[in-house]
Amino acid sequence: MNRTVLVINSGSSSMKFSLVQPDSGVEIADGLVERIGERESIAKVQFGDRTVDRECAVADHDAALRLTFELFDEAGGNLETVGLVAVGHRLVHGGRDLYRPTVIDDAVVAKARELAPLAPLHNPPAVIGVEVARRMLPDLPHIAVFDTAFFHDLPAAAATYAMDRELAEQWRIRRYGFHGTSHQYVSEQAAEFLDRPLDQLNQIVLHLGNGASASAIAGGRPVDTSMGLTPMEGLVMGTRSGDVDPGIVFYLARTAKMAVEDIEAMLNRRSGVFGLGGDNDFRELHRLIEGGSEPEAGHARLAYDVYIHRLRKYIGAYLAVLGDTHVITFTAGVGENDAKVRRDALTGLAPLGVEIDEHLNESPSRGARVISADNSPTTVLVIPTDEELAIARACVAVLG
């Protein structure tokens, strides 16, 4: 029987699960419960070619996981017969000490809870998901896979903030980086796709989803990344600001009399593309730009332009960091599906060795593919990410 890992990604009002066979790379089922704690929740499970969904009140994460298992049975599955060997949990922030895939015990849960201030949107709901799953599946090993792991050994020059050294050491302030599971997986897939040794490639990986990050990877080892102490630094994102002058925080506190918690919520939840353009769905953003009325169309256009400008800045910076760049890869929801973003991010970079083929870029293909021109010194790829598979493989590696 094929080994199967249950991968759980728990959000503040959602819970996503996948049943993945790490040896074959096959995902045999997936499910999602949204609007947990609201009057009407939405749950959906897909198993094989059958999809089962339900709209009902889901009080908490306990109820959400029970419901997904119930729908899985209804779709024709059975957790007892799929060869389940472990439960993998995506944990965003492991701090300085937790970075390898780790078998979860009470001490690990306590440490993840302690690190909540560094990832306030992610760690608390992830801990809830861990606690729920450990109660419901007590006989299986539960393994934490950390978003920060891939970037744990960033060069000191890239990981260090230019601030009071003793204060930074006391409070463990450094650039941790995030989306590491995706950046590592995609960079390895790019090398495999090109049939070239990973240790001979310099790569820029652009993970562009609702959360967005960039990385510079030399010979399989990350040398820089856009996210920092928290997932808020770097690129413009769906609802997060990315890079801002830290003086803005002090200015709003002193002048607008805003509480620190309100400023944090604004920069995390009401900024980025949503804060500027009114929507964080790029399909809606393009619709407004192309056919919307003013002033909404203008707001959407500015949001898009700011997004692209920041993205181009990071690409240019990483071309300089790497010196000789062999591959640039787009991944995640926007990166994989939005040809306009890819085109505008790289237009005009031919003098720097980067040129895309418009026809290849517009291809509706959803698989791994080349979108650069034949004469482009730097190969440009689109590689679908698969964080669930990467987490599942990390889990079985821990189990030996």
Image: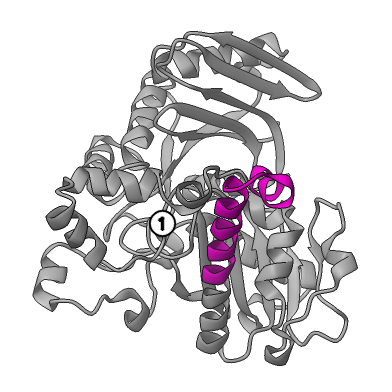
The residue nearer to you, when weighing 335 against 98, is 335
Q: Residue at x 85, y 73 (%)?
A: 357
- What is the basis of the colouring in this image? one colour
In which quadrant of the rendered view does residue 96 lie?
bottom left
Q: Is residue 67 above or below residue 171?
A: above
Q: Is residue 354 above or below residue 269?
A: below
In reply to whether residue 293 is colored magenta, the answer given is yes
Q: Count the marks.
A: 1
In which quadrant of the rendered view does residue 82 lie?
top right
Asked which secondary structure carries label 1, the reply is loop
Q: Residue at x 47, y 28 (%)?
A: 14
Q: Residue at x 62, y 10 (%)?
A: 54
Q: Is residue 146 above or below residue 204?
A: above
**Residue 383, percent across and down?**
72, 59
**Residue 156, percent across and down?**
32, 80
Prevailing secondary structure class for the magenta stretch in the rendered image: helix
Residue that protrudes farthest toward the front in the picture: 294
- Residues shaded magenta: 284-311
